[in-house]
Amino acid sequence: MTLEPTRIRLARERVALSRSALAASLGVCERELAQAPEELSFALAKTLGCAEQFFRLPAASGIDAERIFFRSPRRTSNAQKLAAAAAGRTGVELYRLITQNFALPTTEVPELTGYAPADAAVQLRLDWDLGCGAVPEVLHLLESHGVRVLSLPPELQTVKTFSFWEEGQAFIFLANGSAAEQRFALAHELGHLLLHSALGHHAEQIAHAELEADQFAAHLLMPSVSLQIRVSDLLQIPQLLALEEHYGVPAMIILAHARACGALGENAYTWLSQEMQLEPARAGQAECSRVFSLVFPSLQFDHRASTARIARELGLTERHIHELTFGQAFVLLTGENQRDAGEVARGHLHAL
């Protein structure tokens, strides 16, 4: 019996390891990887950081990297793109397993190709009944409209947040950052999903798409009507910080958008930008998923499906599941106090 070669390739790409490097680490020739025997499963799993079961699953490949919206496509290496594409496939398979037990909303992201970013933001607010104020809980809003949001594994943080369509569903992989940065990143990716499904692959088109996604995110999170009644050249740092809290958007992005909308003059923009450089970084609670906060406790207690069992079904480790789910998947942590079976725990008393 041989192991599934596409799964070997997928696991290899996920850790950005070349075929030749993998073969060398296993002490085999490259041709053997195409028809790897069962005996190699343990060594492959150890080298590639997954479970042996992964190589016995049906054939699969990473998401087509050409269909992924990367934040910095020209600065993202091919190896990083393939690693992101492999992580994307893992996310799709995780959600496929979840939907076997739970009825989740289907993706309701309208097709707005050809719209100007500001018009697309207005149309989405109408479609999703968002009014004209600040948008609460962007991640939860996306999930309620069927967008599958996962957290980006640590080794892919340099790739930054990315998104793609697969099987008629929209997926976003969210990188670490402050709460405000993550909100804007989510809105940026939403802009890609509804504006750029027919995007070509020319560098000029991609660069323009990134600009449009930024503009869409700014208009969605900070509607011009709302912004212009709150911002003028008399704006001071305390008021700006209050706006950062109100909109949940980084202050520097608020300033840039206010200038672009004509609500803030160039001199005021320059002065406030310089002053903000002196302000300490503002911490905020990172985003978390409402889907995972409901799914994993239910799977754990009602369906008797632990994170370990989910990981086994996907051929992954519990750590992989933990990293993809904002740390919301239950994982048993082992430490120095772990004891062998039958070993008696002894207390430690100190005389004072």
Image (cartoon, rainbow, N blue to C red):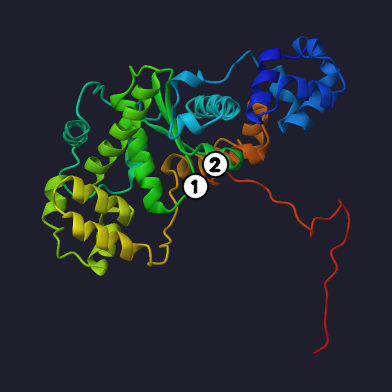
Residue 303 x %, y % = 56, 35
The CA distance from mark 1 to mark 2 is: 7 Å
Circle 1 is placed at which residue position?
Answer: 176
Q: How would you rate the neighbour count of disc 2 (Cα within 10 Å): few for under 14, some for 14-19, many for 20 or more?
A: some
Q: Where is the C terminus found, in terms of image quarters? A: bottom right
**Lower position in the chain sequence, tag 1 or tag 2:** 2
Residue with the most extreme bottom position: 352
Residue at 16% across, 58% down: 231
Residue 105 x %, y % = 36, 29
Residue at 36% across, 29% down: 207
- Left or right of 95: which side holds 155? right
Residue 237 x %, y % = 26, 67
Q: Where is the N terminus found, in terms of image quarters? A: top right
Answer yes or no: do the residues labelled 1 and 2 have beta carbons within 8 Å?
yes
Quick one: SS at disc 2? helix
- Amino acid type at image mark 2: Gln
When the figure is inspected, residue 310 is found, relative to residue 282, above or below; the finding is: above
Q: Is residue 210 visible?
A: yes
Quick one: SS at disc 1? loop
Circle 2 is placed at which residue position?
Answer: 157
Image-quadrant location for residue 187 = top left
Residue at 40% across, 18% down: 201
Q: How many marks?
A: 2
- Amino acid type at image mark 1: Asn
- Left or right of 141: which side holds 52? right
Question: Camera-side residue: 310 or 175?
Answer: 175
